[in-house]
């Protein structure tokens, strides 16, 4: 139920259209990539898990194995969807800089992230029990991080008790930042 609510919000914000090139950053099994493909988008998926990439490929997603901090990314993207991945990156700012560097002028980036609150702390504790570190974010702080990388927040909203989403746009007038 919660994942379906998150997906509805993300898909509404991303405003994907036929022919657009979309990066599904941290694509997992293709949960977001598959509906984007159904809309006629060219979707490139990236994930660090070989099993997830294999599963995404079985679902028709052009997925590759890679770390968002270092992997090859397409040079110009119309949209980026990053749901449930940024919190597991060692250097979220480096990932955001790379997103900005590869997003076309006027392109949109949608980031779904765990909130820095009591529910987010439970989410982080759950992952710690499995040996995985997760970063929690405050929406205002994440919006400021995006701004430092030439991405302007256009919308921000809480989705569940422990998740929120930000829609950011690369200004058409800004030069491509370095990543």
Image (cartoon, rainbow, N blue to C red):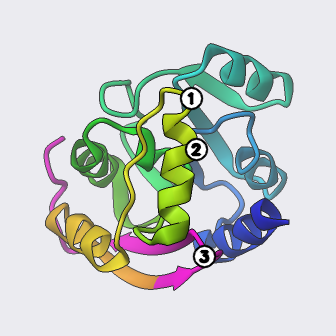
How crowded is the residue under tag 2: few (<14 C-alpha within 10 Å), some, or many (20+)? some
**Is residue 165 highlighted in magenta?**
yes
Cα–Cα span, label 3 and label 2: 28 Å
Instruction: State left or right for residue 81 relative to residue 28.
Output: left
Q: At which x and y percent is residue 168?
A: 39, 72
Residue at (77% x, 53% y) in the render: 40
Task: Give residue 6's position: percent from left, percent from top.
Answer: 70, 67
Q: Could you tell whether 36 is left or right of 77 in the image?
A: right
| Whether residue 28 is situated above or below residue 173 in the rendered picture | above
Q: Are marks 3 and 2 in contact (CB under 8 Å)?
A: no
Residue interval drawn in magenta:
156-179
- Mark drawn on residue 106: none
Q: Quadrant of residue 122?
A: bottom right
Q: Earlier in the sequence, mark 3 or mark 1?
A: 3
Q: Secondary structure at mark 2?
A: helix
User: Looking at the figure, which quarter contains the C terminus?
Assistant: top left
Marker disc for residue 130: 1
Circle 3 is placed at which residue position?
A: 13
Q: In the shown orientation, is residue 105 left or right of residue 29?
A: left
Circle 1 packing at 10 Å, graded few (<14), some (14-19), many (20+), is few
Is 145 colored magenta in this rendering? no
| Cα separation between marks 1 and 2 | 7 Å
Comes first in the chain, label 3 or label 2:
3
The residue singled out by tag 2 in the image is 126
């Amino acid at each position: 139920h919660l994942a379906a609510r998150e997906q509805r919000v993300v898909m509404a914000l991303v405003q994907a259209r036929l022919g657009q090139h979309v990066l599904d950053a941290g694509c997992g099994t293709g949960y977001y990539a598959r509906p984007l493909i159904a809309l006629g988008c060219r979707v490139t998926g990236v994930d660090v898990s070989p099993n997830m990439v294999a599963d995404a490929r079985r679902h028709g997603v052009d997925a590759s194995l890679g770390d968002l901090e270092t992997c090859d990314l397409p040079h110009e993207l119309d949209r980026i969807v990053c749901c449930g991945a940024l919190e597991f990156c060692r250097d979220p700012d480096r990932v955001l800089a790379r997103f900005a560097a590869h997003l076309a002028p006027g392109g949109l980036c949608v980031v779904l992230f765990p909130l820095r609150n009591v529910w987010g702390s439970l989410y982080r504790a759950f992952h710690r029990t499995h040996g995985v570190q997760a970063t929690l974010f405050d929406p205002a702080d994440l919006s400021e991080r995006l701004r430092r990388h030439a991405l302007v927040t256009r919308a921000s909203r809480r989705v569940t008790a422990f998740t929120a989403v930000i829609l950011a746009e690369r200004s058409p007038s800004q030069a491509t930042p370095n990543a």
